[in-house]
Image (cartoon, helix red, strand yellow):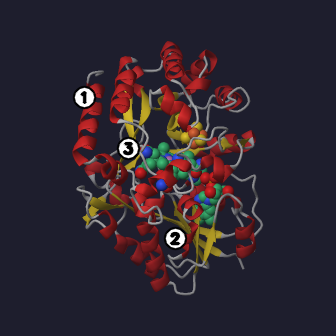
């Protein structure tokens, strides 16, 4: 008998959340590998094209398909009770999932996506509701939280955890042989206007605040035919905006991204492309910038983190300020709108001082590009995350929260002042 599998992307419990092209790509990829070997259903609490969300005017998308989620304000969890911001539950209301479970016969397996470590309360909610309605169904978790906080994830009461990127244990548990050539299971959505792609896994750098090198080992490329087939599947389904989820999208661009984009040009595929996950400016050459703009990249997010060369060296030397300025020059010369180029800078990193951060913000502004403060989330088992044990209990993932940690470190007023300064600088460009 073909097994029945329910895929679930949980609600988010956080101070803030925005649909910055968020999709449960790990879950959809795994389901894609099992395509036609199981009957699938999907419940995505964050699907902004769900009729419940599309009815609400304030949740409408911007020109690139991003937008706000429906939310309810809820009490702060005790660990974060001292953070003076509203804590919320983002996503479809809880009773919709409960009704869904009542309406459908139990599945054999429920596969649950986990993402930010501090979003685990949403995962716990899904497990509790599934257990109650479908007590015999096996609940399987996979993704970032399970990989980075496996001991904590074990306490949530799921039946099986898939840690990291090795799918062999899952194959044995489900007793289904995956077909790794298959693209992600995008057809699980009724309607789709944004999606994501990944051409490679991992990163050649070792930034001291990042988990990617440890989780993925070395940088590796995905089969280009599979990515192209996935892109065509998406465009056929009416997707207009695609965000790359690569860790190092422009590394070895001449071998990976450039041939891919040339093929997109050749096949005359028209789609808006985005890079929310931070590009490494060092690798954005004149030729690459021209090709990216020509093929349809509309927004460019560049990782700067700090303008201090000492900080850059201490954390892994991934990029320098001069390299960032050069990349901006190439991108604007190629025709990118400067206001669609954004530099990320880390706010609330324990080894950044506030004056350094202000200098970084002014530096990005001097290049006529937007700045975005990337609030620091300390990650366990990384050098910088472990250093943060001085301030917070890293074994409680709620303390990895990106809104909370900078406030714990620098105070509420200082964080607000810096955010206001960033807004002012960005307004000065308009
Ligand atoms: C894309 C991405 C984003 C996207 C959005 C992601 C999303 N959907 O929410 C954007 C750019 C918006 C983003 C933002 C941020 N991110 Co981010 N992001 C990533 C990235 C690159 C990929 C995440 C992903 O989708 N993985 C899933 C897919 C791509 O992985 P895969 O390899 O194909 O999956 C395999 C296995 O993992 C497994 N698997 C995966 N999922 C599942 C599910 C099931 C059920 C099963 C069985 C198996 C399985 O099977 C797959 C096949 O082998 C990761 C790094 C990474 N490489 O994972 C960081 C990462 C998750 N982000 C991180 C951080 C720090 C952030 C920010 C806080 C940065 C900032 N300060 O602004 C913000 C927070 C955003 C927020 N809303 O709070 C951290 C995690 C922090 C944490 N505490 O959890 C990571 C790990 C990077 C890092 N620095 O180490 N991010
Ligand atoms: S360059 Fe980016 S993905 Fe690579 S280790 Fe540094 S922060 Fe992580």
Judge left or right: residue 279 versus residue 36. Answer: left
- Label 3 beta carbon within 8 A of ligand 1: no
Tell me if residue 263 can be seen. Answer: yes
| Nearer to us in this view, 106 or 157 | 157
Number of numbered discs present? Answer: 3
Q: Is residue 374 above or below residue 378?
A: above
Which residue is depicted at the point 23% across and 56% down? 84
Tell me if residue 271 can be seen. Answer: no
Q: Quadrant of the C terminus?
A: top left
Q: Quadrant of the N terminus?
A: bottom right
Q: Position of residue 369 (x, y in %)?
A: 39, 23
> Label 3 belongs to which residue?
348
> Label 1 belongs to which residue?
424
- Label 2 beta carbon within 8 A of ligand 1: no
Q: Are marks 2 and 3 in contact (CB under 8 Å)?
A: no
Which residue is depicted at the point 75% across and 52% down? 181
């Amino acid at each position: 008998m073909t097994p029945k599998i329910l895929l679930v992307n949980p609600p988010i419990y956080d101070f803030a959340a925005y649909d910055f092209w968020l999709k449960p790509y790990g879950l959809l990829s795994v389901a894609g590998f099992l395509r036609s070997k199981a009957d699938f259903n999907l419940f995505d609490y964050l699907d902004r094209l769900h009729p419940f969300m599309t009815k609400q005017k304030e949740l409408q998308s911007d020109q690139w398909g991003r937008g706000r989620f429906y939310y309810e304000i809820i009490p702060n969890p005790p660990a974060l009770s001292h953070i003076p911001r509203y804590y919320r539950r983002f996503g479809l209301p809880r009773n919709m999932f409960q009704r869904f479970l009542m309406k459908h016969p139990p599945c054999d397996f429920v596969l649950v996506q986990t993402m930010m470590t501090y979003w685990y309360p949403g995962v716990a909610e899904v497990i509790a509701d599934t257990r109650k309605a479908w007590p015999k169904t096996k609940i399987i978790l996979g993704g970032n939280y399970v990989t980075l906080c496996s001991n904590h994830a074990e306490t949530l009461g799921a039946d099986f955890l898939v840690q990291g990127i090795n799918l062999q244990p899952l194959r044995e548990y489900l007793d289904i042989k995956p077909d790794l050539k298959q693209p992600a299971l995008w057809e699980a959505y009724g309607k789709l206007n944004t999606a994501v792609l990944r051409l490679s896994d991992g990163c050649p750098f070792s930034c001291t605040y990042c988990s990617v090198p440890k989780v993925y080992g070395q940088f590796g490329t995905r089969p280009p035919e599979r990515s192209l087939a996935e892109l065509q599947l998406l465009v056929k389904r009416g997707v207009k905006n695609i965000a790359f989820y690569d860790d190092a999208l422009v590394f070895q661009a001449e071998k990976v991204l450039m041939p891919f984009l040339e093929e997109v040009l050749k096949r005359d595929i028209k789609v808006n492309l985005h890079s929310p996950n931070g590009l490494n400016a060092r690798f954005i050459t004149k030729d690459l910038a021209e090709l990216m703009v020509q093929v349809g990249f509309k927004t460019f997010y560049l990782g700067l983190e700090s303008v201090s060369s000492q900080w850059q060296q201490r954390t892994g030397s991934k990029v320098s300020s001069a390299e960032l300025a050069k990349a901006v020059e190439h991108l604007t010369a190629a025709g990118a709108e400067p206001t669609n180029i954004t530099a990320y800078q880390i706010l609330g990193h324990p080894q950044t001082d506030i004056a350094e951060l202000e200098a970084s913000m002014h530096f990005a502004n001097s290049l006529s590009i937007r700045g975005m403060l990337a609030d620091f989330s300390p990650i366990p088992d990384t050098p910088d995350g472990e250093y943060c044990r001085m301030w917070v209990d890293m074994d409680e993932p709620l303390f990895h929260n990106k809104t909370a940690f900078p406030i714990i470190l620098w105070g509420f007023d200082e964080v607000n002042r810096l955010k206001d300064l960033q807004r002012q600088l960005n307004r000065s460009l308009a």
